[in-house]
Amino acid sequence: MARTTKTVGIFCGCLLAVSAARTQEMAPAPATIAVKAQRVLDVRTGTYLNDAVVLVEGDRIKAVGPGLAIEPGAKVIDLGTATLLPGMIDAHSHLLADAEGGYAEMLLTKSQAYRALEGAAHARRTLLAGFTTVRDVENEGSGYADVALRDAIARGLVEGPRMLVATRGIAAVGQYMPFGISPDLPGFPRGAQMVSGLEECRRAVREQIGNGADLIKVYADWEHPTLTVEELRVVVEEAHKAGRRVAAHATTVEAIRNAVGAGVDSIEHGSGADRATLELLAQKGVWLVPTLGPYVNQLNALTDEAARQRGQKWFRSLQEMVRTAKEVGVKIAAGYDASEGPLHGTNAREIVALHEAGLSRLEAIRAATVTAADLLGLQDKIGSLEPGKYADLIAVAGDPVADIHALEQVVFVMKAGVVVKREGGSPP
């Protein structure tokens, strides 16, 4: 029996070796694509390369520059007067969220399968808007459906941006949505994994990483600080030893300081931060993801004039926070925080909002490219058009350094060497 098993093993091994060799012989050489445009933006220097070419081989950029030789047989994509720049990055997305009809209703009426399919539709819209990578910071009560969506996109089963996922998120018991649910329904689904105490925090991180989390999202506060510094520190400790970064929702000064003291990598929102707290972020090298977009959308939806004036006053304080963060040297990344169906795919509004809050147009573009790539730990793969990086390219009709709104009209998208949009949203 042992001899037969050994013989079969050798035979199968030989077949596999022959098959592999044959596959290598039959596989065509990587096709070269030459993408030409009037301008190519170097997001690091802020300069334009005029009449430049981006040479793409397989899923990577081979070369970038004006006057590059295009080898015979290469596919040429001439975008005319368009501006080429790197695929954009949304550092705070919730692709599986559509709470337009109410948060509790979303959890109660939609299965995880439906949420995943809905997320796939949101992912496609986000990709076609020019966002080729997202950091999805919690799936809002859909279990581990974001892991499934990430993997389906990576396998090419559905179209969408490259995803880093935080899975369920971690929040203190009683301190995350939905609120107001009857205590007679203890099993009603929640939008995050609810914890209390050090060991529950530790277990939640281990469980989420074991189920595929690329990063950990933790809620340091809601209306007031919730998890203690010690609880936050356990979350960070468990995540960091597994090589995962931690994003902390924090809007109050105390919670922001608690999270930074615990060693988190980024503060999400940070709306209540004062100057001293922002200086602490700068000193510790912690990123800030201000998520201004939702507030812009809410303001635009207000019809009551008094409410609109109150909202504008609040929003001006957020803009002042961003200006102060810039002034003291905090690293700022763009994250749109879309949580309703119609908003997915309008992610560039966040970049516009950052510019209107005080970042220069180029700084706002960097917040959605090179700076966001650093936050994701993918600076050697995405965020700029450089040889060796993924061929994530987008094109806009105008000049985004002169008019930031040009980023809201993306006419061409390539992700990892594959064209997914060309002229007005039609696939190639």
Image (cartoon, helix red, strand yellow):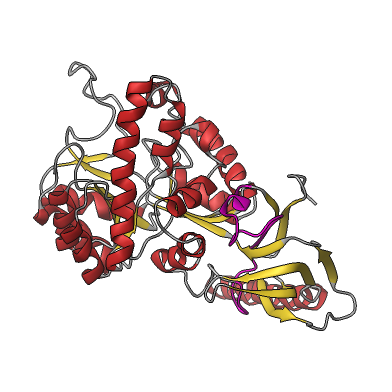
Tell me the residue at 24%/25% (across/down): 179
Q: Is residue 55 visible?
A: no
How far from the left and from the top, in percent, is residue 274?
A: 19, 54
Camera sees residue 345: yes
Position of 341 relative to 40 (above/below): above
Q: Is residue 390 left or right of residue 111?
A: right
In magenta stretch: residue 390: yes
Q: Quadrant of residue 78?
A: bottom right
Q: Farthest residue toward the right?
A: 72
Seen from the viewer's position, the closer of residues 7 and 247 is 247
What's the magenta bit mostly, secondary-structure-wise? loop
Look at the image and tell me in which quarter the N terminus lies: bottom right
Q: Residue at x 10, y 50 (%)?
A: 228
Range covered by the magenta-colored residues: 385-408
Question: What x and y, as percent, mark residue 83?
Answer: 69, 63
As for residue 185 lying within the magenta part, the answer is: no
Q: Residue at x 19, y 35 (%)?
A: 175
Q: Residue 307 in the image: x percent, y percent?
A: 33, 24
| Residue appearing at x 18%, y 36% in the figure | 223
Q: Is residue 239 left or right of residue 415?
A: left
